[in-house]
Image (spheres, rainbow, N blue to C red):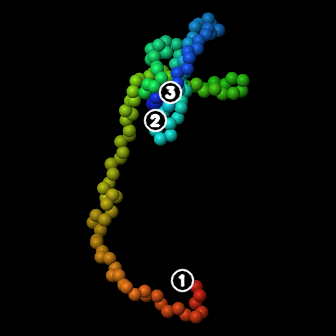
């Protein structure tokens, strides 16, 4: 998946040692998407990617992400992991619209033209009868 937006928060880097004795590092970022209704998305970078991308607050980025969910003690947790970051916004190609038949845009092509009905100045209502109390 790909998201675009501006970095509005950079969390402090955290790290530790795994059960296997390997060192790990993680840093989280909050990106605010573009559009009429912007959304905030927290994503993380792991290990050497933190130094590789060196993300700063206020930068406009395009981020490729993977989503991963895990169950722990009966609850589900979802992590948004970035695997590639590019500065600026990629111009995402929009799918091409199908060709439009112009006859639909102008339905009067080839149709006979009619003149407007003559306008009358007097109201032409029939005379009402005593027993007819319906309006139609």
Within 10 Å of disc 2 (Cα), the crowding (few <14, some 14-19, many 20+) is few
Q: Could you give the CA–CA distance between mark 1 and mark 3, rounded to whole angstroms? A: 66 Å
22 horizontally vs 116: left or right: right
- Residue 33 drawn at (x, y percent): 48, 33
- Residue 113 drawn at (x, y percent): 28, 72
Residue labelled with disc 3: 8
Viewer-nearest of discs 1 and 3: 3
Residue labelled with disc 2: 34
Query: Which sits in the foreground, 98 or 28?
Result: 28
Which SS class for mark 1? loop
Question: Does label 1 or label 3 sit earlier along the sequence?
Answer: 3
Q: How many marks?
A: 3
Within 10 Å of disc 3 (Cα), the crowding (few <14, some 14-19, many 20+) is some
Mark yes or no: residue 70 visible. yes
Please tell me which residue is depicted at 48% across the width and 23% down the height of the picture: 57
Please tell me which residue is depicted at 55% across the width and 83% down the height of the picture: 135
Are circles 1 and 3 on residues that touch, CB within 8 Å? no
Residue furthest right in the image: 73
Question: Does label 1 or label 2 sit earlier along the sequence?
Answer: 2
Residue 61: which disc?
Answer: none
Viewer-nearest of discs 3 and 2: 3
Residue 136: which disc?
Answer: 1
- Residue 38 drawn at (x, y percent): 50, 36
Q: Could you give the CA–CA distance between mark 1 and mark 2, rounded to whole angstroms? A: 57 Å
14 horizontally vs 3: left or right: right
Viewer-nearest of discs 1 and 2: 2
Which SS class for mark 3? strand
Query: Which sits in the foreground, 38 or 110?
Result: 38
Which SS class for mark 2? loop
- Residue 63 drawn at (x, y percent): 46, 26
Please tell me which residue is depicted at 52% across the width and 13% down the height of the picture: 47
């Amino acid at each position: 998946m790909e998201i675009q937006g501006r970095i509005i928060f950079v969390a402090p880097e955290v790290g530790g040692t795994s059960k296997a004795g390997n060192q790990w590092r993680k840093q989280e970022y909050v990106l605010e998407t573009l559009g009429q209704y912007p959304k905030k998305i927290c994503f993380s970078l792991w290990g050497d990617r933190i130094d590789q991308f060196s993300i700063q607050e206020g930068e406009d980025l395009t981020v490729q992400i993977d989503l991963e969910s895990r169950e722990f003690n009966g609850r589900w947790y979802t992590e948004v992991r970035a695997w590639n970051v590019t500065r600026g916004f990629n111009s995402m190609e929009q799918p091409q619209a199908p060709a439009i038949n112009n006859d639909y845009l102008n339905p009067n092509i080839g149709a006979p033209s009619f003149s407007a009905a003559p306008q009358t100045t007097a109201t032409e209502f029939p005379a009402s009868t005593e027993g007819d109390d319906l309006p139609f």
